[in-house]
Image (cartoon, rainbow, N blue to C red):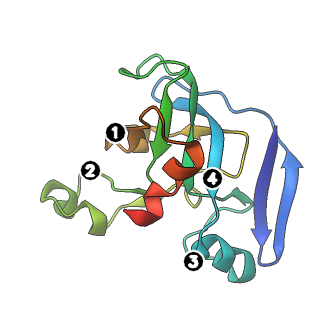
Amino acid sequence: MKVARFYEPGDLRAEEADRPTPVADELLLRVRACATCGTDVKIFHHGHRNLKTLPRVIGHEIAGEVVEVGDDVDGWTSGDRVQCIAYVPCGHCFECTHRKMTVGENATSVGYDYDGGFAEHMIVPENVLRVDGRNRIPDGIEYRVAAATEPLA
């Protein structure tokens, strides 16, 4: 499969990669749309302090179709249309347990801490599933529109 992998400022490469395989508590998503936001442009030009492991497949405004469902994941089946969150609260810290999940101290992000959506397929990690960080895309909504819900939220 094709991915866009960020190595360092000015170095974003289109590469071949193996299709990932989900473990028991993950989903495999066929990416149908991944928007490019201002942060992606900044990453390309300057990098980002939260990108601690390089190279990394970036892209965090994602909409796609479930391809595989891990054995421990309930409520999702192959073919479901889904939009994923980018910012992933831990769900356990003081802020998260007091309804302040957007400022939690242990948050991670898709495209920073986990490979993102500039790929043909991507893993939706357990952390995203644990905090209910995916949304069903209603019939009639295009994938490209669903991908734009993250910056609009």
Q: What mark, if any, has residue 34 been given in the picture?
A: 4
Amino acid type for the residue under numbered disc 1: Arg
Q: Residue at x 41, y 20 (%)?
A: 72
Q: Look at the numbered discs 1 and 2 and tell me whether their residues touch, using CB distance below 8 Å.
A: yes
Among the two numbered marks 1 and 2 on one chain, the one whose residue lies closer to the N terminus: 2
Amino acid type for the residue under numbered disc 2: Gly
> In the structure shown, which secondary structural element does the residue marked by tag 4 occupy?
strand
Residue 73 falls in which quadrant of the image? top left
Closer to us: mark 4 or mark 1? 4
Mark 3 Cα shell of 10 Å, populated few (<14), some (14-19), many (≥20): few
Q: Look at the numbered discs 3 and 4 and tell me whether their residues touch, using CB distance below 8 Å.
A: no
Mark 1 Cα shell of 10 Å, populated few (<14), some (14-19), many (≥20): some
Which residue does the numbered mark 2 point to in the structure image? 91
> In the structure shown, which secondary structural element does the residue marked by tag 3 occupy?
loop
Question: Real-space Cα distance between discs 4 and 2?
Answer: 25 Å
Give residue 148's position: percent from left, percent from top.
51, 57
> In the structure shown, which secondary structural element does the residue marked by tag 1 occupy?
helix
Tell me, yes or no, if residue 86 can be seen here: no
Q: Look at the numbered discs 1 and 3 and tell me whether their residues touch, using CB distance below 8 Å.
A: no
Which residue does the numbered mark 1 point to in the structure image? 130
Q: Residue at x 45, y 28 (%)?
A: 25
Question: Real-space Cα distance between discs 3 and 4?
Answer: 22 Å
Q: Look at the numbered discs 4 and 2 and tell me whether their residues touch, using CB distance below 8 Å.
A: no
Give residue 17's position: percent from left, percent from top.
82, 41
Q: Residue at x 19, y 64 (%)?
A: 100
Q: Look at the numbered discs 3 and 2 and tell me whether their residues touch, using CB distance below 8 Å.
A: no
